[in-house]
Every structure is written in C-alpha cells, then in structure tokens.
Image (spheres, rainbow, N blue to C red):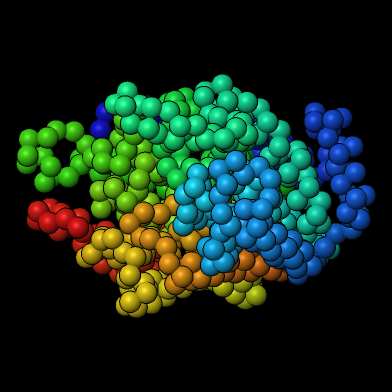
Amino acid sequence: MTAIGWLQAAVFFLIVLALTKPLGSYMARVFAGERTWLHPVLEPVEKFVYRLCGVREDREMTWYAYALAMLAFSLIGLAYLYVLLRTQRWLPFNPAHIDNMAPDLAWNTAVSFTTNTNWQFYSGETAMSYLSQMAGLAWHNFVSAAVGIAIAVAVVRGLARTTGKTLGNFWVDLTRCSLYVLLPMCVVIGLFLCSQGVPQNLGAYRTVRSIEGVAQTVTGGPMASQEVIKELGTNGGGFVNANSASPNENPTPLSNLIEMLLIFSLGAGLTYMYGKMVKDTRQGWAIFTAMSILFFVAFAVAYWSESAGNPMIHQLGVAGGNMEGKECRFGVSGSALFATVTTDTSCGAVNSMHDSFTPLGGLVTLVNMQLGEIVFGGVGSGLYGMIVFVVLTVFIAGLMVGRTPEYLGKKVERREVQFAILAALVTPVLCLVPTSIAAVLPAGLATLNNGGPHGFSEILYAFTSTNANNGSAFAGLGPNLFYNLLTGANMMFGRFAVAVPALALAGAFAGKKSVPESAGTFTTHSGIFVALLVGVIVIVGALTFLPADSLGPIVEHLLMLQGKTY
C-alpha cells in the first residue's frame, strides 16, 4: 500500500461528499415538482410525454397501484428487448452482420437489463448489433435506473407523509427522473468521455495490423453514450466484453475517476434528498455516514489484500502486489477502489477481473453484494435497501430499551417489521439456495473452469451478483442453458421481490401520524444510531453468509498460505 493509493481514495470520496448536497437538493426539487433551472427547456417535453401517454400529473397512486405500474412497465420492457435480440440479424445498424441471439441467452439478457443487473453471458462486440446496443441495452440502462430511483422516492414519500395513503405517481416519477436527472448529466459527461477517446460512431469494425504484423479487429460503435449511463445508472453492462478495463470504454486515469464518481454520485445524492424530503437532513447524513464507514472498511481490506499479493509469487523473488487481471494504467489501488465502488453499488462495471483478485480481495466484492449493496447502492435500490435495515435497527433498539420503536415520529409496528424482514430475507435465500443446487448438479459444474474452493466461489459469486442486481462476475463460470434460466429467474426476483415489500413498507408508513419527540425517543441521527445500524448490517450479513464464504474465499486464502492454489 502507498500514500498515493490512499490519497486517490481520499480525493475520490471528498468529491463524492462535495456532490452529495447539491445533487440531493436538486433531486428533491425535481421529485417535488418544483421548478429548476432546466424547466424552461424540459418542461414542455415533460408535458408532451404526459399528453402522449395519457398520464394525469395530479393523480397519485397507492403503494400497490404504484407497484403494479412498475411491474407492468418492466415486463413490457423485458418483452421488447427479448424480441429485439431475437430479430437483430434482420434489423438495421448491424454492420458486423451479427446473428440473432439464442432464446435462452436472449431471455437472460432481457431480464438482466430490465432489472438493472446487466449480467452478461456474452461478448458485446460479437453478440450485439449497434441497434441492440442503442435501442435495447442503452434504453434499458436509462429506464431501469429511473425505475429504481422512482421506487426510492415513493418509499421516502411514505415515510414523510402524515396524511393520505398515496406515494406519488409512478409515470410522473419515471419521466422526471429520465428527463431532469439522467439525460442532462449523460449528455454533458458523454461528450467528456468522447474527448478522452471513447468512440461514438456507427462505422463498421476496422481491421488493422499491429506492430508485430498481426491482423487485429478494432471495435467501434456508439460507445460513449452507453458508457456514461452504464455508470451513472449503476447498470454496468459493457459495450465490449472487457468492460471498463478496455481502453475503448475507459481510456485514461481521468476517465477512470469520472466513471467511479458517476457510479457513486446519485446514490450519495439520494441520501441528502431523503433528508430534505423528510424535513430533517440529519437523517440523510446519518445514512450517508453508515454507508461511508462500510465503504472505507471494504476498500481498506481489498487494497491491503491486493497490495500484499500472493506469497507463493513472493517466494520466487517477484516483488509487488497482485497485478494479475489488472490494467497497468490503473494499478493495484485504482483497481481495488473501482472494485469496491462497483460492488458497493449495483453497478457491476469492472476495470479489472475480480476472478483474478486474491481470495480476500475477492471476498470483499462478495460481501459488498451480500450486504444487499446498500453502500450508496444501485440508484434508488441502495436507499430503500438501507431504509429496510434502518427499520430493523429501530425495531431492535426498541426491544433493547423495552418500548415501542419509532422512526421519524411514527411507530414501527408488526406490519412494518414484517415487510422489512421479508425484503431482508430475499438476498440470503436467493443467493444461497441456487448456489447449493448448482454446486451439486452436473449442469452447474459443466461450465466451471476451476475446481476446489475457487470454483465454489465462482458459483457463489454468480448467484450473489445476479440476485443483488450487480452483474459483475468471477469470469471462470461459463454460460449454458441451466445458468441462463436460473440466473435469469434470480435477477427477476432479486429486483422485484425486494422492491415490492419496500413499497408495501412505505404504504404501511404513509398516513401515520407523527408524534413529537420525548425524553424516551431513540435518536436516529446520532453517532450511537449509526454504530448500531452498521452493527446490525454486519451481524446479519455475517450470520447469513459466513458459512458459505468460509467454503469459498476464506478457505482458499488459508490454502494459499500453505502453498496451494486453484
């Protein structure tokens, strides 16, 4: 580890901190329907969309109507992308003459991008036409991110409102998020990425001859426009197979920093938006602090482990950290930081290969996802996932002091706790059960490139990543019909089986009267509460996943110290 490596992480976090308040304030105004500096340009477009779609801006929805609208929109989008992938061979903007995608892979990919997972069992440069990339994947990158933010906004409204049982209008929230939040940032930063060297064209691939005299195909295409929303929307699906490790997608250290900032910025801003909407910014900063603590601990472990490297290599007289699977232009610190950021959120973009990390470095990426990716998290999903843990923490604190728990002045009763527990159970069940099935079936082992604990880690990582809607992978696991179908179902439930209980939780809180604080009220913006919240998150994660993680990266680390690798 070096001072420069720590300085890189510190500068990154300070920029995120500086962006949190202005972004959060802006989003609070957008979703409250207040005027912003973009309204003179975008408000006519917004009104036109409402007229075109028959949306009444003033008509709000109950939690179950909101959930039904969200599910219907997502399922129609899934069907649209599936048809597009199955027919891309006959459609325009296909200069490489790429064939139609196989049915099971098209299903897996359509679910993946609909759920903001962007799990990729294919190579983008050989499996996707430009039309599929632009009108299919990039479009889903926008709307799946907007859906997540809309759900988070609805959940916050439920906590904030003391009258009525409605949570807003899904179609209005979806439109405002896309128009006022995602599109403007993508236009500006997309142009910046072009200036750094990220391609943005519709030309055919080019064949060039390298300095060694070998013919090589250089990919082009509308890459910058997809790269920016891939990171900003915490989607993660790369235009090319190497993702953000590719010089085309991520050409410079500056573009690397900007891409990491894109991944964290909206998730951090949503915490301040939360504080503004509940009229107590201390609540938002408390959640931000808890997220920050988990982020720094994860980065410290990953950076230390990757800097220490493999002792078996050191015995051969080779100094330095673990550079296998890493880009020299980013180094150990830049790779460890990017890996921590992308698995803290539901992004899944990579600038190095997580499969090549040391066992403990790989464990960090696993644990980040197993916690529910609540550390700033996917746009929207991180916030409502953290709110679920806040409710559980308040309930536990109430049991400790022997009184009815309260949050934001509202009593947390049986119904709210049931919805919170239901949402919290989704991740462990849908990570561990499919992993145990795949680890014993011939179909689950058929495409595994590694044996022993590392092979088990590859399976565990796949179902953890797909359930957490992350999309990154230990790439030693290959696709087949079994994995295409099972990970597709896992992504679907990982998204909606958490979102619907979160909306139900908001519906249970909506309209509850808020009582004034008293001497016995447990303060939920203090340092004690932040420590208790972090403790609950870590303890729940450890009790749930430690046995499985022990069979994978932990035992692999111990065996590595004894001189054995897989």
Residue 300: quarter of image:
top left
Is residue 10 something that shows in the picture? no
Q: Residue at x 80, y 31 (%)?
A: 38
Viewer-closest of 418 and 126: 126
- The x, y position of residue 50, in whole percent, is 89, 49
Q: Quadrant of the C terminus?
A: bottom left
Judge from the rendering whether residue 247 lies leftward or rightward of residue 499; answer left or right: left
Q: Residue at x 86, y 39 (%)?
A: 45
Whether 529 is drawn above or below 212: the answer is below
Q: Residue at x 48, y 61 (%)?
A: 466
Judge from the rendering whether residue 214 lies leftward or rightward of residue 402; answer left or right: left
Is residue 294 something that shows in the picture? yes
Whether 360 is drawn above or below 467: the answer is above
Judge from the rendering whether residue 463 lies leftward or rightward of residue 158; answer left or right: left
Viewer-closest of 347 and 515: 347
Viewer-closest of 230 and 498: 230
Residue 562: quarter of image:
bottom left
- The x, y position of residue 129, in whole percent, is 59, 46
Residue 222: quarter of image:
top right
Q: Quadrant of the N terminus?
A: top left
- The x, y position of residue 261, in whole percent, is 52, 34
Whether 343 is drawn above or below 218: the answer is below
Whether 209 is drawn above or below 151: the answer is above
Q: Residue at x 77, y 50 (%)?
A: 173
- The x, y position of residue 285, in whole percent, is 57, 42
